[in-house]
Image (cartoon, grey):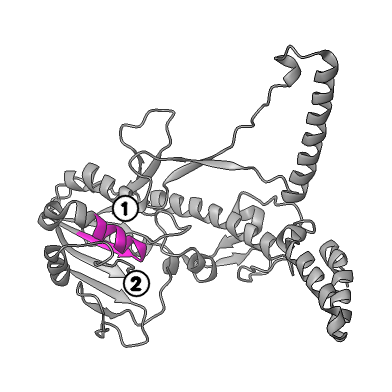
Amino acid sequence: MSISLSSLILLPIWISMAQILQGGPDEKEKTTALKDLLSRIDLDELMKKDEPPLDFPDTLEGFEYAFNEKGQLRHIKTGEPFVFNYREDLHRWNQKRYEALGEIITKYVYELLEKDCNLKKISIPVDATESEPKSFIFMSEDALTNPQKLMVLIHGSGVVRAGQWARRLIINEDLDSGTQIPFIKRAMDEGYGVIVLNPNENYIEVEKPKIHVQSSSDSSDEPAEKRERKDKVSKEIKKRRDFYEKYRNPQREKETMQLYIRENGSPEEHAVYVWDHFITQSAAENVFFVAHSYGGLAFVELMIQREADVKSKVTAVALTDSVHNVWHQEAGKTIREWMRENCCNWVSSSEPLDTSVESMLPDCPRVSAACRTER
């Protein structure tokens, strides 16, 4: 049996604690002192000391996984489904590994949108300079020219990106369950143009620039002896800081900063931007939305900001487990009336499909999706 470094560090403390708890009232002061000591120990930081490097493959093949003919993620050697707990008692490392795989799957789904669904990747903002942060959406060839029907898909919040409903379902179930691809293909088969929004791609992450502090000896007229003393102190402080940083961040994970994408810094902004620059330019007589979870909230915000335009162009909205709230979002009476007539929210329920589900909000009908959906 292997014992981790963090366990060895904590073992004497736990033993002392157990001995004190077996003692009488005279041991209260010691108990308080030990509790104070334990409260100062960051267990998450200690656990990092035992972690393998956070160095993961950047391809599915590197992870030794692939999607089979049923769209299920399986190990290429064993045929087994994905295993989250790859290393026992290393939850943080397992989570980082899961996130690394998730990023690969996001790129994989992007490829499917282009290759299998024949969608075009469109960069936004449309007038972005070469150096500024950018996002993108996906559109069918006829998205703006189809004179009859346009389908717009909006996913929920979190780590999902364009083309996905739920990452967990993609990894643990299959591509049909977790991606928008079945919706896209059916819509195109039935003559719809398609636009796939990407509301969670709000910023790019870049490494924080290192701050170089100029040595005091470079710009001071102080006597040499005083400068030497100050430099010695400065070096000692830097040595302590580096030691602390090595403890705080033993794997030297990069510290990043976020650069937000102009006019697309939130899901709500993104929905309005795509409406203004694409959907309003489409020739379609009838526009339909499918919005999941937070995507429903983004649609309601779009209605609040572009009410007349939405009413004139949108025919119907299918919501799934939408988290919108007409009171908190301050949607007016005319919006609520329009939603009652033109929207329907399919929600998680064990009731048969399309069974009416009671709602406390006076907006759109809620009916059963006859399943548990993912947010």
The reply, left or right, for residue 271 in relation to residue 204 is: left
Which quadrant of the figure has residue 186?
A: bottom left
Residue found farthest to the bottom = 351
Give percent across and percent down for residue 266. Answer: 37, 50
Number of dots carrying numbers: 2
Give percent across and percent down for residue 133. Answer: 43, 36
Residue 299 drawn in magenta: yes
Give percent across and percent down for residue 277. Answer: 23, 42
| The C terminus sits in image quarter | bottom left
Is residue 170 shown to the viewer in this render? yes
Report the front residue among 80 and 55: 55
Pointer 2: what residue?
A: 321
At x 72% / y 48%, what residue is drawn?
Answer: 249
Per the rendered image, the range of residues in magenta is 288-301
Task: Work out whether 145 lies above or below 60.
Answer: above
Pointer 1: what residue?
A: 268
At x 26% / y 48%, what residue is drawn?
Answer: 272
Is residue 186 shown to the viewer in this render? no
Q: Which mark is residue 109?
A: none
Which is closer to the viewer, label 1 or label 2?
A: 1
Give percent across and percent down for residue 42. Answer: 73, 61
Report the front residue among 109 and 2: 2
At numbered mark 2, what does the secondary structure look like: helix, strand or loop? loop
| The N terminus sits in image quarter | bottom right
At numbered mark 1, what does the secondary structure look like: helix, strand or loop? helix
Report the front residue among 47 and 108: 47
